[in-house]
Image (cartoon, rainbow, N blue to C red):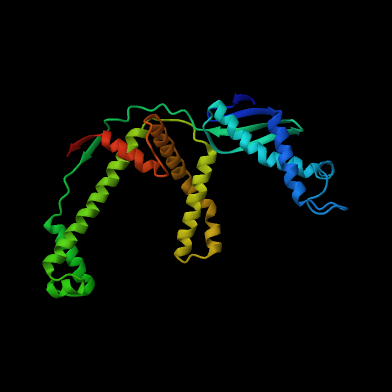
């Protein structure tokens, strides 16, 4: 396999690929064999026409099938050979195919070079979480108000599935604690992301941004439909929604690429939960201080 890579810009590459000999020859033989088993040729039973007649009558079909089956495989081998970390689908063009020669060119996007700063020992400020009597009282009062009653007692607790008022208050205290804990965790993780991403500037692959934007747009339209907004009204808002969501899509892709780079550098064993795995690593390595 012959390959040549041309750098177009920070994230765009063109790769020229050429393969010859047995790889192409064997693929043609395989394709013609498949066609022969199902070909309907006048004067012969299905699957019994001579190979030379199959090759003559179905050369165009075989040509297209070889391209469809061989090009994707050769493309992936080529970018692996060149160590290109491709993102999105390539634009393949100038495909040339002969009996023992295949060549093509592909424009592709690659992950940008990200010059990470020190991401270990990031500052994490946390507060000891407590539930105050005032917070508990506000929750009890809210229940009383929704039930249109003046007194919180065991009867109220039982109506909500608790044996007595004390058990209800303990359950509410636990709920408030978990809510405050979740809010603090969300803030801590956002602070970590801001510290990691601060002053990092790199070009984002348009294909990743567009894919993220389309998914966010799809979800936004679903949310509007669930609110009862007619389809035609939603379609009228699509351009506005797209504009509003674009900045967020870019931000999410930037964060994803940064976290992916950290995962690669630290050789983290990650699966589809990349963000969660990297965040766990960053929190473990952080400098925690109570405030």
The answer to whether residue 95 is seen in the rendering is no
Q: Is residue 13 left or right of residue 58?
A: left
- Residue 120 image offset from top left, x and y in percent: 29, 30
Q: Which of 78/278 is in front?
A: 78
Q: Report which quarter residue 142 is drawn in.
A: bottom left
Q: Is residue 284 left or right of residue 55?
A: left
* Image quarter in which the N terminus is found: top right
Q: Report which quarter residue 54 is drawn in.
A: top right
Q: For the point 54% across and 51% down, which residue is it?
A: 239
The answer to whether residue 202 is seen in the rendering is yes
Q: Is residue 263 left or right of residue 203?
A: left
* Image quarter in which the C terminus is found: top left
Furthest-right residue in this view: 43
Q: For the point 21% across and 58% down, which residue is it?
A: 175
- Residue 238 image offset from top left, x and y in percent: 53, 54
Q: Which of 88/147 is in front?
A: 88
Q: Report which quarter residue 19 is drawn in.
A: top right
> 268 above or below 169?
above
Q: Is residue 105 left or right of residue 166?
A: right
Q: Which of 155/51 is in front?
A: 51
- Residue 89 image offset from top left, x and y in percent: 58, 40
Q: For the point 48% across and 59% down, which residue is it?
A: 222
Number of marks in picture: 0
């Amino acid at each position: 396999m012959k390959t040549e890579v041309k750098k177009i810009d920070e994230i765009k590459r063109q790769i020229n690929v050429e393969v010859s000999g047995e790889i192409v020859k064997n693929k043609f033989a395989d394709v013609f064999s498949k066609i022969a088993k199902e070909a309907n040729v006048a004067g012969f039973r299905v699957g019994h026409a001579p190979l030379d007649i199959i090759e003559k009558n179905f050369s165009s079909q075989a040509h297209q099938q070889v391209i469809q089956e061989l090009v994707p495989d050769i493309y992936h081998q080529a970018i692996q050979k060149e160590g290109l970390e491709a993102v999105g689908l390539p634009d393949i063009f100038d495909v040339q195919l002969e009996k023992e020669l295949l060549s093509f060119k592909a424009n592709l996007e690659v992950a940008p070079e990200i010059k990470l700063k020190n991401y270990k020992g990031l500052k994490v400020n946390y507060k000891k979480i407590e539930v105050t009597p005032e917070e508990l009282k506000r929750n009890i009062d809210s229940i009383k108000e929704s039930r249109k009653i003046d007194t919180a007692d065991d009867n109220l607790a039982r109506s909500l599935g608790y044996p007595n008022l004390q058990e209800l208050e303990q359950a509410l205290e636990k709920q408030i604690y978990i809510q405050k804990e979740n809010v603090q965790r969300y803030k801590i993780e956002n602070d970590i992301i801001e510290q990691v991403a601060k002053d990092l500037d790199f070009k984002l692959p348009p294909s990743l941004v567009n894919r993220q934007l389309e998914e966010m747009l799809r979800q936004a339209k679903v949310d509007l439909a669930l609110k009862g907004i007619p389809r035609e009204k939603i379609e009228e808002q699509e351009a506005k929604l797209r504009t509003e969501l674009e900045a967020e899509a870019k931000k999410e892709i930037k964060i994803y690429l940064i976290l992916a780079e950290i995962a690669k550098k630290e050789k983290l064993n990650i699966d589809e939960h990349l963000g969660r795995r990297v965040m766990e690593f960053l929190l473990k390595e952080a400098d925690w201080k109570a405030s």
